[in-house]
Amino acid sequence: MLEPLFATCSQQSLAALLPQMTERRCQAGEAIFSTTDKATHFYLLLQGSVRLISPLGREFGLQHQRLGEEVVHGARHYLTNARALGEVSLLQIPKAAMLTLAAANPSLKDELLLSLTSHLAGEKLAQATPVAAAAVTSKKPALKPARIIGWLLALLLPLLLLGYGEQWGLNRTTTIFAAIFAAAVMMWSFTLVDEYIPALFAVLGVLLTGLVPTPVIMSGFASDGFLMALSTLALGTVVVSSGLSYRFMLILLRRLPNTQFWQVFSLFSVGAMITPIIPTLNGRMALVAPFYADMADSLGLKPRGAAATRLAMACFSGTTLLSAMLLTSKSINYAVAGLMPRQDQEYFQLLTWFSSAGVVLLALLLLYAAGSAIWFRNQEIPQLPKERVEQQLQLLGKLKKREWAALFSLLFIVGGVATSAIHDISPPWLGFTALCVLVLCGFLKRQEFRDKVDWTFLLYMSGVTGLAATIGYLRLDTVFVAALPALGQYMHDHFLWFVLWLFGLMCLARLVVPNNATVIVAAAVLMPLAESAGINSWVIGFIILLFSEIWFLPFQSSYYLQLHDLNKNKSLYDEKSFLYFNAFMNVARLLAVYASIPFWKMMGFL
């Protein structure tokens, strides 16, 4: 790099910065910027000489080959005027790109402050003077009516159950557990606290009341699901932080034909391929959304046009469409698996789960591809400068040791799962082995392991798995079966109508209840009924997971809000068209289930 300032920056962040750079030429006496201009760009001086002029007329030269450092430090306008003394060549970088670079490389901000003060002082300074942090006054947020209602229900429902549970035919143990579970569900339903806290609250309540032996309620922390989730989270951290995922995207852009179809396909594929590695929808969206923004900018797509909206839908669908198809894609999948009988839990591992959902996946992919091509048809011809992608790859250089380690770990897990019938080693142990190797060899650093692995997600998943085990231990499934015999019979006799009923119920529930709470309650009630009706509980659990991803309004989907916020700042795609197509994909989920029913009957699940 020409500028020593960037010597300490990560190569991945520099590669992402490269497409944002443009060259600017100025003639002698031309103003580069003035104190009345908004601070929108940072400049690197390539050739020529520049004079800085203070508002009071004092003139001084540059102490470094850069100017416009104000953009990183929140200044609305430039602090000085800058004028070209002769013919000048500059590289200009937008403010947003510099802020992103500074966020990825914290030391850069201090270096730019030192550079700016050196210019103003007229001499190179040895160190920057620390800037006092601005006092931040925070107002206590007002308690909204919905939260007040939520807390009242979380307190009153358990008291109601404890007071009248025995009169309703519940024994003492069931009454206590129902009170604990009701409080947790209210906390989830009204989003009173972070989603892992109700799970911990329920675990604590069961432990204190002694409803079940400690190993039962704590089984989630020793389950295969916990090992697999921990391993995939850690591996995902190495894949992202090493730069392997970013390199892979660039290779895709370089290799694939420069047409709209293949660009949409490549972005969809990136989201789909990280789905089994990063088991949170929000985590996957956080990784892929910047790729979408970079691609839309690089391709020069019309803002809010059909091509940009189609690319946005590819970004969203790639990260979400396979969520129910893969056991490792979401924490709630493990919780649903924990509600199945033991023999089914052993049977529906990674490949069996995926193959059993194969017809649904195929139907969804066909409906998505056909619908997307028709819905977003356009005549735009995007042009991706391959030479720029090549420059970004050259800047990344050869594969680093951490990238090789991440790549080999991925191949080890995928290969191990594919050959599990030969060596008979379960996938969680393969993942845990890969994690141990990454930690022992120093490829997963302590700071990353502590800060970037989503431990709250692991606490939530383990708590919910323990609750599922408690429901089984207390044989509450038989209580549900006894309380709702007609529903189980209806499920058996009229399965097609039951699926439509469940679709409508999930759509209504998702208007007011968060995704995970909806899944927990529906699965806990309906999966035992399915077993009693002679229907494999996996089918009901899978359909619940699939339908729980239905949403129509942005507030219903936390992972879509990440894309929504990106669009609000950059105006990339047409949100109205996006939401209408998403509604079509909601119906497509129902059609895909109906398409899979003959296959499930052939497999003996129905």
Image (cartoon, rainbow, N blue to C red):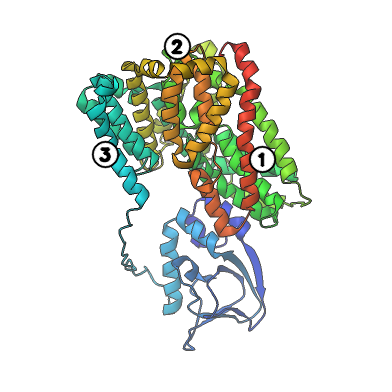
- Please identify the quadrant where the N terminus is shown: bottom right
Mark drawn on residue 106: none
Q: CA distance from mark 2 to mark 3?
A: 38 Å
- The mark that comes first in sequence, 2 or 3, is 3
Please, which residue is most extreme toward the right here? 379
Q: Taking the image as drawn, is residue 195 in sight?
A: yes
Measured Cα–Cα span from mark 1 to mark 3: 50 Å
Q: Which residue is mark 1?
A: 266
| Callout 2 crowding tier (Cα within 10 Å): few <14, some 14–19, many ≥20 | few
Q: Nearer the viewer, residue 217 or 175?
A: 175
- Report crowding for label 3: few under 14, some 14 to 19, many 20 or more residues within 10 A (C-alpha): some
Q: Nearer the viewer, mark 2 or mark 1?
A: 2
Question: Residue 96: where, in percent of width, then height?
Answer: 53, 61
The residue located at (70%, 56%) in the rendering is 300
Residue at far front of view: 167
Which mark sits nearer the N-terminus, 2 or 1? Answer: 1
Of residues 211 and 89, the one nearer the viewer is 211
- Residue 213's x, y, as percent? 25, 18
Q: Is residue 421 above or below residue 549?
A: above
Amino acid on which disc 1 is placed: Ser
Q: Amino acid at mark 3?
A: Leu
Residue 378 at x, y percent in the picture: 76, 49
Residue 417 visible (yes or no) = no
Observer-nearest residue: 582 or 161?
161
Percent from the top left, x then y, of residue 88? 64, 75
The image quarter in which residue 468 lies: top left
Q: Which mark is residue 343?
A: 2
| Mark 1 vs 3, N-terminal side | 3
**Secondary-structure class at tag 1:** helix
Q: Which mark lies nearer to you, 1 or 3?
A: 3
The residue positioned 57% from the left and 54% from the top of the image is: 567
The residue beneath circle 3 is 155
